[in-house]
Amino acid sequence: MKIGIPGALLYYYYGPYWVHLFEELGIEVITTQKTDKKTIDRGIGVSVPEICVPIKIYNGHVLRLVDQGVDYVFVPRMVSVEKGKFFCPKFMGLPDMIEHGIPAVRSKLLTLDIQSSTEDITSPKLIYPIAGKLGVSRSEIRRASHSAGRRWKKFRNLCLEGKTIKEAWAELDGAGSPLERSHNSLKIGLLGYVYDVYDEFISMDVTARLRQLGAAVTTFEMIPPKLLKKHVKKMKKSLFWTFSEKLLGAAYSMFREGSVDGVIHITAFGCGPDAFLGRLLEIESEDSGIPFMTLRIDEHTGENHLQTRVEAFVDMLGRKFGKTGERQ
């Protein structure tokens, strides 16, 4: 049996768990390679025009898996990973959009509901509903889930040590390298959903670009969850969306504790939750005096546009604070 996992959306956050889970069950896992222009173009062809580019990219990755002849395409329905908080409606309706928007995958769709009280979704109970389709027992799922869960927790701990998701995953696979940071380097907070920040095609690999410019990068997944919650608890009303609140907690930590020299927010054009989040970030920047920049991305974003704005922002911070931020 071959199961395909689209290399998009929350694959960047939960991929280490999902891939290892199925492999531990003796199933061959096929994941799509990096996004390219053809992937986006194909995704656009089966998507409604108004939907955000991350969903268009996901659709393109699904089509690539269909081309590879997998038996199933794994498309989880992400509902909630925190009590009282939920995912964007597009995540909750993703299996339905795939089923009705891409007829070729209808008979291959493998889905389950992810509803948990914490971001740790490694409970075997969440996997039991697909045991029949996979042809495995509950005891096999428990064993595989526990093994994959340990791998995911190690992955998260690596992120909390200051590694990007890309670096943490590489270290899991034995290809990591020690972090090298200059004490005089600029510190930049990079806020954005993992699928906006770490899809190297749509974000133009902004984390690597910032590192090349001599900046140390901090993202939300590097900040302990307790610290994220500490800051948002003071709000009169919390945000409805799980990962939006994580980003807001990270922003409060950065702005209010002065742990960074500047903040960049990467957002997909047309993202509903970010319409709220973006304004809150602007207010925090004004109150703290820490420079802030928004980068909006979509399928039309050009590399020169993003690169020029990032370089100008880093150069401005370098002049302001007298720290390293030069082209390397």
Image: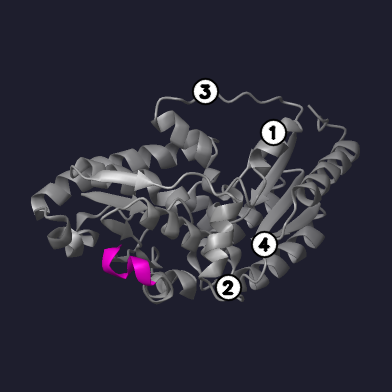
Q: Are marks 2 and 3 in contact (CB under 8 Å)?
A: no
From the viewer's perspective, is the residue at label 3 or at label 4 nearer?
4
Q: Dot 1 corresponds to which residue?
A: 211
Is 108 part of what is drawn in magenta?
Answer: yes
Local secondary structure at mark 1: helix
Count of numbered marks: 4
> Relative to 147, does residue 264 appear above or below in the rendering?
below
Question: Distance between the Cα atoms at labels 1 and 2?
Answer: 31 Å
Q: Dot 4 corresponds to which residue?
A: 298
Q: Dot 3 corresponds to which residue?
A: 177
What secondary structure is the magenta-colored segment mainly? helix
Q: Dot 2 corresponds to which residue?
A: 51
For label 2, the crowd category at 10 Å Cα-Cα, with few meaning under 14, some 14 to 19 and many 20 or more, is some
For label 4, the crowd category at 10 Å Cα-Cα, with few meaning under 14, some 14 to 19 and many 20 or more, is some
Local secondary structure at mark 3: loop
Which numbered disc, 2 or 3, marks the residue that appears first in the sequence?
2
Note whether residue 170 is visible. Answer: yes
From the viewer's perspective, is the residue at label 1 or at label 2 nearer?
2
Q: Are marks 4 and 2 in contact (CB under 8 Å)?
A: no
| Type of the residue with mark 1 | Arg
Direction from residue 275 to residue 17 in the image, left or right: left
| Type of the residue with mark 3 | Ser
Residue located 52% across and 23% down the image:
177
Is 169 part of what is drawn in magenta?
Answer: no
| Type of the residue with mark 2 | Ile
Local secondary structure at mark 4: loop
Which numbered disc, 3 or 4, marks the residue that appears first in the sequence?
3
